[in-house]
Amino acid sequence: MIITLSADAELDRVRRELTGRGLWIASTEKSSEGTTHLVIGRESSESDPRELATIAGVRSVSATASPHPMMDAHGPEVTIGNVTISAKAPVIIAGPCSVESEAQIRRIAGLLRERRVKLLRGGAFKPRTSPYSFQGHGPEALRWLRRAADEHGMLVVTEALSEADVPAIAEHADLIQIGSRNMHNYALLKTVGRAAKAVLLKRSMAATIEEWLLAGEYLLAHGAKGIVLCERGIRSFDDSTRNLLDLGAVALLAHVKKLPVVVDPSHATGKREIVLPLAKAAIAAGAAGVMIETHDAPHDALSDGAQALAPGALSALSTWLDGSMR
Ligand code: PEP
Ligand code: MN
């Protein structure tokens, strides 16, 4: 339920009236015209929107049957600085799976910038299936990533793995990534939401689209400044590819729900040979961009080398994107 207050409403009094009715304010949003919108958690289905509209200071009450009203109202684009993520002009997000050293990320950033890549990705905190695999260089890698991106006028995309790291991630990242394994980590979603940044929300490997949208709702309800959904493949019975790329979900989100969704064909396939064809298929399905793991020495990568492309391999995709009529 969304309650819009009149300009002279006393917020504290409205809050008391609502809590007295068993409702609570999940988040407060100020629109550019200065109107305050309260997003209300509905504790009891008894609360009658017509009765709530009689509270002094309440201008309108919009009760919606949808469990994710903020995602429904989100819109098809997210703008961060001078970059707009939109299916009208799909972006390439690229970079290594893990930030391995300052020299590595600077080298890769330079090679990617020449190929139209405006968003640099790289993991500082890595969610590895095995505790013995490389876990990332942590806070130091955040600084390397930021410096490399700044040197080339790029934006930073990096994953927040735990609540404790969110302040450091928010300081260094332009787009905070929630990884597949954490899409259901609601405590992390709330903390990342409160950082008030744009979020790249990866789909959990077994999430329905509805669960994915609700994870987005968590982020928005706690203050996130925009959600870019990221389809990265779901689990299937066949392990010929690492995951099963669900382009039907992409088309549904882009064309029916009108939301920005990017596709990660690297984690979806685990095989560098089929990353580029699926990147093009993703754009054809309505994606607002692709996220592709790139490494200047894929065979020596500390993580996910088998799916990494050399930065030069993105030239053809950039040219294709520039030429693709939308
Ligand atoms: C990643 O993008 O680095 C990553 C770990 O992906 P996912 O969460 O989709 O497995
Ligand atoms: Mn990876």
Image (cartoon, helix red, strand yellow):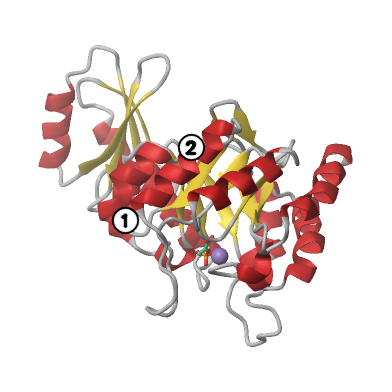
Residue wearing tag 1: 188
First along the sequence among labels 1 and 2: 2
Q: Position of residue 253 (x, y in %)?
A: 63, 52
Q: Amino acid at mark 1?
A: Leu
Whether 57 is drawn above or below 173: the answer is above
Residue wearing tag 2: 147
Residue at x-position 20% and y-position 43%:
24
Residue 66 visible in this rendered orientation of the protein: no
Residue 190 in the figure: left or right of residue 233: left
Residue 120 visible in this rendered orientation of the protein: yes
Secondary structure under the numbered disc 1 in the rendered image: helix
Q: What separation in Å lies between label 1 and label 2 (alpha carbons)?
A: 26 Å
Residue at x-position 30% and y-position 41%:
194
* In front: label 1 or label 2: 2
Residue 109 found in image quarter: top right
Residue at x-position 46% and y-position 45%:
144
Residue 46 in the figure: left or right of residue 274: left
Whether 62 is drawn above or below 102: the answer is above
Residue 8 found in image quarter: top left
Q: Amino acid at mark 2?
A: Arg
Secondary structure under the numbered disc 2 in the rendered image: helix
How packed mark 1 is, by other alpha carbons closer than 10 Å (few <14, some 14-19, many 20 or more), is: many
Q: Position of residue 240 (x, y in %)?
A: 71, 84
- In this rendered view, identify the residue nearer to me: 1 or 188: 188
